[in-house]
Amino acid sequence: METVTIGKALNLGLRRALEDDPKVILMGEDIGRLGGVFRITDGLQKDFGDDRVIDTPLAESGIVGTAVGLCLRGYRPVLEIQFDGFVYPAYDQIVSQVAKMHYRSRGQVRVPIVIRIPYGGGIGAVEHHSESPEAYFAHTAGLKVVTCASPDDAYWMIQQAIASDDPIIFFEPKRRYWEKGPVDTDTEPYPLHAARVARPGTDATVVAYGPMVRTALDAATAAAEEGRELEVIDLRSISPLDMAPVYESVRKTGRLVVVHEAPSNVGVGAEIAARVTEQCFYSLEAPVLRVCGFNVPYPAARVEEDFLPDLDRVLDAVDRSFGW
Amino acid sequence: MAKPAGTPPPEPEFVQLLTPDGERVEHPDYRVDFTDDEYRSLYHDLVVVRRLDAEATALQRQGELGIWASLLGQEAAQVGSGRAMRPQDMAFPTYREHGVLYCRGIDPIMPLGLFRGVDQGGWDPIEMKFAMYTIVIGAQTLHATGYAMGIAMDGKVGTEDGEAVIAYFGDGASSQGDVNEAFVWSSVFHAPVVFFCQNNQYAISEPLERQTRVPLYQRAHGFGFPGVRVDGNDVLASYAVTRAALDQARVGQGPTLIEAYTYRMGAHTTSDDPTRYRIASEVEAWQAKDPILRVRRFLEQQGLADQSFFGEVDEQARVEAVKLRERVLELPDPAPVTMFDHVFPNGSPEIDEEREQFTAYLSSFAGEVH
């Protein structure tokens, strides 16, 4: 067991994936000599060579499109999109090709691509560097979408995603890259597409994923001081959603608050609210509430703290749930 | 909007080995060395490919296909380039490469299943060395480039038995970002890929002038690899230029752009009405450059074939077309529940649940008469 940051855990996970399978290759902008703008691939090109850790032309559609061809050749490309807001030039290749190739070919072609995307705000960046576009991808059949919230999950989930034959969008909580935690490199990893109770509680359920798990846990700590025990569930997989632990929790607490940075409109929270309403209707003591980014373009950095859900907004939603 | 100034362009310079009159001409850089049998089999393929295409158009008109993208007029570009591929080479087609598909030895029923709507293309792309049809314009050029990068990574380039890739696209696709990215990538990675652009003069209704102000093959120069224009209605030249480019790619000389200068004699698809955007005299002018007629004239002039041969080929084509028609009519509709299959290699509990719900819903109608 060692204590590392989420960023370092991803680096260690990628290293192990490169060691385990010679068909694994990394492609992206500035991921080689520089080690990526967040240094997630630091040292990997030096150790595995520039034909396995490939600095690409500055062309996101090209990164994803060539990866499709490499899959037909038996490779397992792991792609880095430098920032969330830069994935859109590759959107067509992801949605129309990566997601549909296996279906179109009735299972004859596999595209075991992992697309790593650092996402979310809170780093004081300029436009296009703080977005949460997960719903676009979760909406597309043929893609799986996951996100990690701890170093241990970062280490294991990236390896599981790479080993999976499904195309996977792997969202990395960029503002949590530097948060430390234990990583057990010898354990049996938790299933990739399973949600997990991050903190048990009895009074209300808070569902979060990625960067908002930390926020939800902090809110639970604060709520406990006031005598309310929040159960925090880390979704981990956004598509498919593992709803069983959520249903179980809501049947126990009767109250649900969903937290994500992405705007609320037609988002993951809306899907969760719909499913919980279908499955737990008689257990609910209050409507499912959402704490999300507002339905505006990601704002200028000096107001992003007001845009992003934080501890107070989560607690406010919990209060509203109890006040129903 | 201002139109480019000047008079209509003259006949472009291109590599030609067989004139519309059937006369063999020599070219300093490109030659073919076919046996008499090979010349005759080229003619056979051209005729069969056109006949099957006509059958597919007829099937659409009779309501048996949802839509058909005819290759009429482009037989030489497709048969020439398709037969230039060596067995180890890989092709990435658009949705119109029925002639290449035929040369690849793939059952010609396959694209008809797609256009009938019973599947989305049934062949195994890896085994047949012929990727799935790609409907999004230009997307496949990046797949081809990536596959070619993989060839290089596998060490399968640099020798005469190396592998190469051919990416098909059209004049309209030349404006796509993906095609231009594919040019950049293949160039900087020195990938063994040949870009085969069938310039059929129209992207649905838009003429070439709306895509480019320079001849398309000249664009290659700016990306750092050679470009060559070939008479796309000349099967010999199409073959020779493609074979040379593929062989250069496989020995490590990098990409080539081939512009096959041709003409889409028919509509873009059966849903299109070309009379709205082009005049009959233009089509007639291209009719005089027909890709099949010139091979027939050549065979006649050289004494390589007689009327009985041509009749025999026509009969073979007719029999193949009849067979194709019969088989299309017998293609079963897929069971509705199969729409849930193959979304993921590893499956998904959400899709399994939907499949179960849908199956239960369907079974609720059991016993009802519709």
Image (tube, coloured by chain):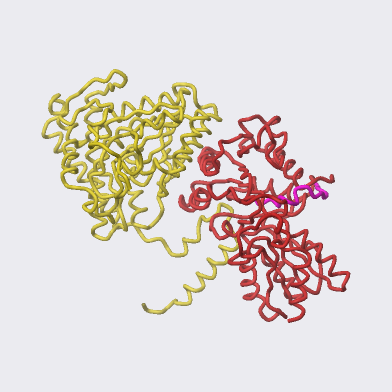
Give the chain letter for red.
Answer: A
Quarter of the rendering containing residue A26: top right
Nearest to the observer: residue B76 or residue B86:
B76
Task: Check the image and name the residue furthest to the left.
Answer: B307
Residue B67 pos. (x, y %): 31, 55
The number of numbered discs placed on residues in the rendered structure image is 0
Left or right: A176 in relation to B316: right
What range is drawn magenta here?
A: A170-184
Nearest to the observer: residue B53 or residue A44:
A44
Could you tell me which residue is drawn at 53 percent across and 58 percent down?
A: A141
Left or right: A240 in relation to B302: right
Residue B160 pos. (x, y %): 44, 21
Nearest to the observer: residue A53 or residue B151:
A53
Nearest to the observer: residue B358 or residue A210:
A210
Residue B151 pos. (x, y %): 51, 31
Tell me the quarter of the image containing the C terminus of chain B.
Answer: bottom left
**Eyeballing the image, is A52 above or below A141?**
above
Which colour represents chain B? Answer: yellow
Residue A217 pos. (x, y %): 80, 62
Left or right: A288 in relation to B343: right
**Eyeballing the image, is A75 above or below B355?**
above
Could you tell me which residue is drawn at 73 percent across and 41 percent down?
A: A11
Could you tell me which residue is drawn at 46 percent across and 23 percent down?
A: B253
Instruction: Give yes or no for residue A177 being in the magenta stretch.
Output: yes
Instruction: Give yes or no for residue B52 being in the magenta stretch.
Output: no
Quarter of the rendering containing residue B89: top left
Quarter of the rendering containing residue A265: bottom right
